[in-house]
Image: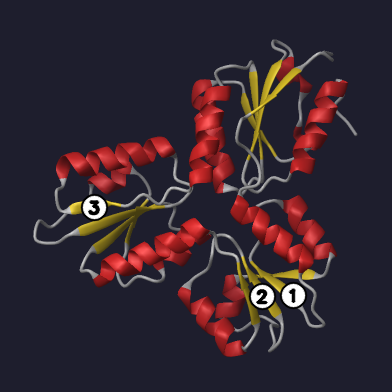
Amino acid sequence: MKSSFILKRAEKMGFCFGVKEAVDLAKTIKSDQKIYMLGMLVHNEQVIEKLNSKGIKVVTEEEVLEGRDEICQGDSVIIRAHGTIKNIYEILNQKNVIIYDVACVFVKRSREELLKHEKDGYKIVFIGDEFHPEVRGIVSFGNDVKIVKDIEELKKITFNKSEKYYILAQTTLNKNLYREMAKYIGNNFKNCKVGNTICGATFERQKAVEKLSTEVDVMLIIGGKNSSNTKKLYNISKELNGKSYMIQTHKDLDFDWFEKGNKIGITAGASTPDEIVEKIESILLGGRCNG
């Protein structure tokens, strides 16, 4: 078994400022009443477990919408970086709870762009995963938003020449897909305007993994299995380096991956704390697969 691995981190990786703000806030809230986080504050089971241990409970959007939650007046509710749907904000305000809204600035900007352009007479087309909480939240503020998941679905839309359209995108959309989308729209439809709502941190992380994956033998992408941005980092890496592996913690490591190469690249999704990355690095440098 090798014990002389060369580890190289991506230039940009790990917690983004939005996620960090949400987690830091959750750790510092003090209240005599209950504290809830609306959905998983971050897509990382280890982080959520730590917050649970501090007495912060998860309440789902469905529970709030259906009146099955136990949130009472004076309780605290943290709205995660993804934001949430319009109805949830209204319900929480009616309950007279303390709201800590840490929706990411890029999510808030997308929301504002949608409202502004609808007011100006644009029809909204949104590129993203319709089931992702960020997308569900943003489009809930619109009147009639068309959601498409990729460039293929976008090409099936009939753009009425007598209408004007504004194109929004999920903040964590793959940057290559965004470029392809913008080029297609620009070349074919003069009545369409493409907004730039890709998160800057997401763009930097995707660019960094693109670079690093071509410089190493094996690429590790660390993040929660339900993390959209981690999956996108993995997909970008996998296209360039066949030996790319997505893992959640050190327990997922398989030393057989490294038999034919000792240069290991490491990146992490926006919901992955440094301690998880450091644990994996210490194990690799120690040449052992346990601990």
Helix, strand or loop for disc 2: strand
Label 1 sits on residue: 35
Q: Residue at x 61, y 51 (%)?
A: 17
Above-or-below relation of 37 to 208: below
Q: How many marks?
A: 3
Spot the residue most to the left: 162
Q: Tag 2 or tag 3, which sits nearer the N-term?
A: 2
Q: Residue at x 28, y 61 (%)?
A: 124
Q: Is residue 217 visible?
A: yes
Q: Tag 2 or tag 1, which sits nearer the N-term?
A: 1
Displayed quadrant of residue 35: bottom right
Q: Residue at x 75, y 54 (%)?
A: 47
Q: Residue at x 57, y 23 (%)?
A: 213
C-alpha span from label 3 to label 2: 36 Å
Q: Which mark is residue 193?
A: 3
Q: In screen coordinates, is 131 left or right of 35?
A: left
